[in-house]
Amino acid sequence: MPGLSEILEVLLLQNYNTRLVVLSTTLLGIAAGLVGSFLLLRKRSLMGDALSHATLPGIAIAFGVMVALGGEGKSLPALLLGATLSGVAGIATMLIIRNTTRLRDDVAMGFVLSVFFGVGVASLRMVQDLPNAAGLESFIYGKAASVVMSDFLLIALVAGAASLVCLIFLKEFLVLCFDDGYAAAQGWPTLFLDVLLLGLVTAVTVIGLQSVGLILVIAFLITPPTAARFWTDRLLPMLLISAVIGGVSGWLGASLSALTPRLPAGAVIVLVAAALFLVSMLFAPVRGVLPRILNQAALRRKEDRQHFLRAAYEILEDQAGDAPVANRSFPYEALLPKRSWTPRHLRQILRVARREDHLEPAPPGRLRLSEPGFGEAARVTRNHRLWETYLIQYADVAPSHVDRDADMVEHILGAELVRELEAKLGGTLPDQRVPPSPHSTGDRNTRSG
Amino acid sequence: MWTSFDTWIVIVGMLCAVACALPGCFLVLRKMSMMGDAISHAVLPGLAIAFLITGTRASVPMFLGAALAGLLTALFTQWIMRFGNVDRGAAMGIVFTTLFAIGLLLIRRAADHVDLDPGCVLYGAIELTPLDTVALGGFEIPRAALVNGGVLLANLLVLTLFYKEFKLSSFDPDLADTLGYSSQFLHYLLMTLVAVTTVAAFESVGSIIVIAMLIVPPATALLLTHRLLPMLLIAAGAAVLAAITGHLGALVVPGWFGFESTTSSGMIALASGLIFLLAWLFSPDQGIVMRRFRTAPAPIVPLSNTNTDIA
């Protein structure tokens, strides 16, 4: 087990042996996070999958060709050039299949992925007999520890350039991703932009081959952007978050792998990214699963409270007849038929109302609103009726139907909107605190809301 | 210099390819080809865990582990799609890369005391299958042939039993649901078939080339016919042809470039790709070349215009 100082040394890039590895995967993560974001928004995440598998024959063939030409064979730029060329050929095949047959994208991608990989495996096995061929398979699973200074420079250069292009073409990619039809109609060169995007994906994939391998580099392109999507609905923040998640995965993953024997960097990086994804999916405030559930529950509670208060106010109105409405006690039985509540649900609502001090102690079988509860009930009822009147006058909703329509919106009426409604309806409303209901307020057992 | 070894390799390849092509047809028709990709990558941890527990290859636990991993892939993808509002492609990508990473980690960590080569997982060792034989009724039959033959029979059985249901739910899942055939159930049944078939094939051809067997023959068949039963038959025929020509190619092609040998599995993938190319060029009603010679070219009819979630 490595000590704390050793861990810190690796994480803070003080260790000479691991510095290059950690830095290169971090840069790779950042670039992949940026490029992958556009790929995700363009709904082409799996393109990276097909593309990365399609690079294998290029690596093997480039090696074979270089040896045949009398070279050493193991020069990284040449191998990556081969990878790029076969990756591009893969994309071209994919597009041809998609555009000339009735087969769809998924088949085209599966075809390219598997056939190219098969060719790659076959040619890899062929060149295996050549001297110095050992280690070519490390492109499949990745071998981060093999990164040397010249490799690092190449990775940094390509990652930097890819990130820069992403930022330069931010606006163009934004239009392309969100509405390509509009972009084309406005005269944007959508074909060029698509090709540019795929070019960036190819670049990131190819430089990721050496350190994380051709299967796990897919995760670098997909996971950080998808995680980032949970945190925001805006493009620029999403790009930043995605780059951060990608960078952190690369940094933490490579460091962990460097500190522990027999922990392949690619796999650890993917697992760190997956953990960040899981946290984002569950807890991210904007689109996370848990906050969404909590929001829904809170809205349901608010609805219940407002329905209860309005029902109580309407009962009091009925009791008062023509006299002004006063806060008196009323029988529990009168409440139940007002809405399609089950007795159990109603008891729960009443418990909450007591906790919120909307109810005062009352004789058994009867309920009595507290002073603040009564005020709140008047306010809620007033908002409901304002909205109903508005719907009748401006949206031509029939008075007999307006209750349900109003129900759908009134819970989210803000103070601003209420003032606006008052101003609009001011002339037509009787001058009193709560206007009368524009429809009959009898038992509402048969209605939903 | 064709030996009985070569015969067995071709037989194993054929059984494998046909066993894959049958469920593959439904994957292609349901526009879920990439699910085959995801599942075949993701069975790795299932295999690794089963292997670590039992210590043997190609046993019942291995099947169970892989089938479970395959089902989990389908399930997790569905959950991330539904609860996270994530695009299907992205959800699949996250699930299968994560599971693959877990599997890779397990194998590497246990590399000292187990013999499961990660390279083998990806491209198999079909050349070695005739060495591992089982005595059956006086004959020495390679275990891989038995396993793949068994899976082929199982696939045939399930697809025959549920032919009508699969047909209906592939073309109109809503109608299938309305009529009381749960397309959910059929979906997971198909995923299980794919997972089990993948595992059976993985030992011989590896987890990525198996995708070529799942997708490419059905895609070829789809270029040649518009009907389901002919499609299944043509796909099976293309699979057999690919296995034979693939192995022949593995014997012949390396010589052209001055190399000694190559893998049959890779060449089978290449052969199926070339058969697809032929169909693409010369299909009677959809081929590129044939359309040239027609007065009124047949329109390209997409499978469906409604599904765009894998773009």
Image (tube, rainbow, N blue to C red):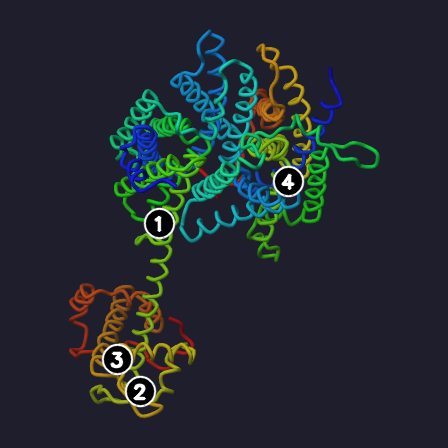
**Residue A224, horizontal then vertical, whole percent:** 36, 41
Front position among marks 2 and 1 = 1
Answer whether residue A208 is visible to the viewer in this image. Answer: yes
**Image position of A192 (left or right of B262):** left
**Image position of B300 (left or right of A202):** right
Alpha carbons under labels 4 and 1: distance apart: 39 Å
Q: Residues within 10 Å of mark 1 (few under 14, many from 20)?
A: many
Q: Which residue is mark 1?
A: A280
| Three-letter amino acid code of the residue under disc 1 | Ser
The chain holding disc 2 is A
Q: Which residue is mark 2?
A: A367
Front position among marks 4 and 1 = 4
Q: Residues within 10 Å of mark 3 (few under 14, many from 20)?
A: many
Mark 4 in CB contact with mark 1 (< 8 angstroms):
no
Q: Which residue is mark 4?
A: B56
Q: Nearer the viewer, residue A185 or A63?
A: A63
| Three-letter amino acid code of the residue under disc 4 | Thr
Q: How many marks?
A: 4
Alpha carbons under labels 2 and 1: distance apart: 45 Å
Q: Residues within 10 Å of mark 4 (few under 14, many from 20)?
A: some
Q: Which residue is mark 3?
A: A358
Question: Which of the image's four quarters has the C terminus of chain A?
Answer: bottom left
Query: Between disc 1 and disc 3, whose residue precedes?
Result: 1
**Residue B243, horizontal then vertical, whole percent:** 66, 26
Question: Residue at the top extreme?
Answer: A70
Say which quarter of the image contains residue A246. top left
The chain holding disc 4 is B
| Three-letter amino acid code of the residue under disc 2 | Leu
- Dot 2 and dot 1 within a common chain: yes
- Dot 2 and dot 3 within a common chain: yes
